[in-house]
Amino acid sequence: MATDWSTSDIDVEGLSDADIEQLDSLLEQVAVPHDGMSLEMLDGFLSALVVGPELVKPSEYWREIWNHDPEWPDRATGAEAHRLVLSLWNDIVDRLQVDLPDEEVDEDDDELVDQIEAAMPLLALPEVADDETTEGFGGLPDDFPLAAAWGVGFMRGVGLRAEAWEAWEREDEDLAEALTSIARLTVLDAEQAEQLGLPADDLPDLAERMQITGSIPSMLQAFNQQRLASYGDTHVDIDLCPCGSGKPFQQCCGDKSRLN
């Protein structure tokens, strides 16, 4: 299915629109055919790692993205893949710094609407005809699984540090409720509902998906505040090269002098 990417009109430094399209294409070619991650799923996955209770290093999560060990045609291509993924990580970090409004925003307040959009995740939306609205989530069919892949990616990230996340849930009821809401995004059928301990017919409709999706920025900021309060900034070494060498990316696979 063809998709548009829901993203802010304001380009975030380090992740341009061209980067988004390039990363999307790379994942569709190298990851998705191997049951790896789409761009939406990767956004959710990295979001969980950014705000999570314990550091997950690139050497641990890199293979999770592709679900295999990609064989890049040359060092330059591999380095570009690393750069794009790290740029998305940094974009997610930037979203956490957006000053979210405390109350419901008037749709006519363009400045605040742009502010909220800058904090939203990358979501794959169906292409619409030129005469149909693309503003917000308008025009989506009732059965569209809005943010389902994002939720799957987030919960996969949670799974890499499941015990630490469970400890958070025990400590804070609001955080536990937020995590349950994100998990609901993953539910597409009765079997998945039962796996989460829900009635078989308790499937989120589009209205609920829209409500949860609109709350993603505030939920992520709440998770991040808990992380900072509990552990401090544990993600200072995010620029380590995903190849697992332990060296900074710019001194390893990203070293321009070593690129073919």
Image (cartoon, rainbow, N blue to C red):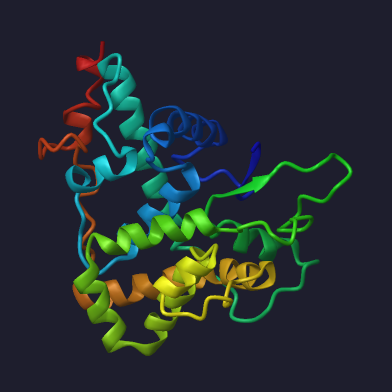
Q: Is residue 93 visible?
A: no
Q: Is residue 29 above or below residue 226?
A: above
Position of residue 50 in the picture relative to residue 33 (left or right): left
Between 143 and 222, the one lying in front of the other is 143
Residue placed at 33% from the left, 20% from the top? 77
Residue at the far left in the pictured view: 246
Q: Is residue 33 above or below residue 260?
A: below
Q: How many marks?
A: 0
Q: How far from the left and from the top, in percent, is residue 69?
A: 24, 31
Residue placed at 76% from the left, 67% from the top? 109
Q: Residue 210 falls in which quadrant of the image? A: bottom right
Quarter of the C terminus within the rendering: top left
Between 234 and 24, the one lying in front of the other is 24
Residue placed at 19% from the left, 42% from the top? 240
Position of residue 122 in the picture relative to residue 77 (left or right): right
Q: Residue 59 falls in which quadrant of the image? A: top left
Position of residue 173 in the picture relative to residue 238 (left or right): right
Q: How far from the left and from the top, in percent, is residue 221?
A: 43, 70
Q: How far from the left and from the top, in percent, is residue 90?
A: 38, 48
Q: Is residue 61 above or below residue 228?
A: above
Residue at the far right in the pictured view: 131
Between 153 and 232, the one lying in front of the other is 153
Q: Is residue 187 visible?
A: yes
Residue placed at 35% from the left, 30% from the top? 81
Quarter of the N terminus within the rendering: top right
Residue at the far top in the pictured view: 260
Q: How far from the left and from the top, in percent, is residue 52?
A: 29, 66
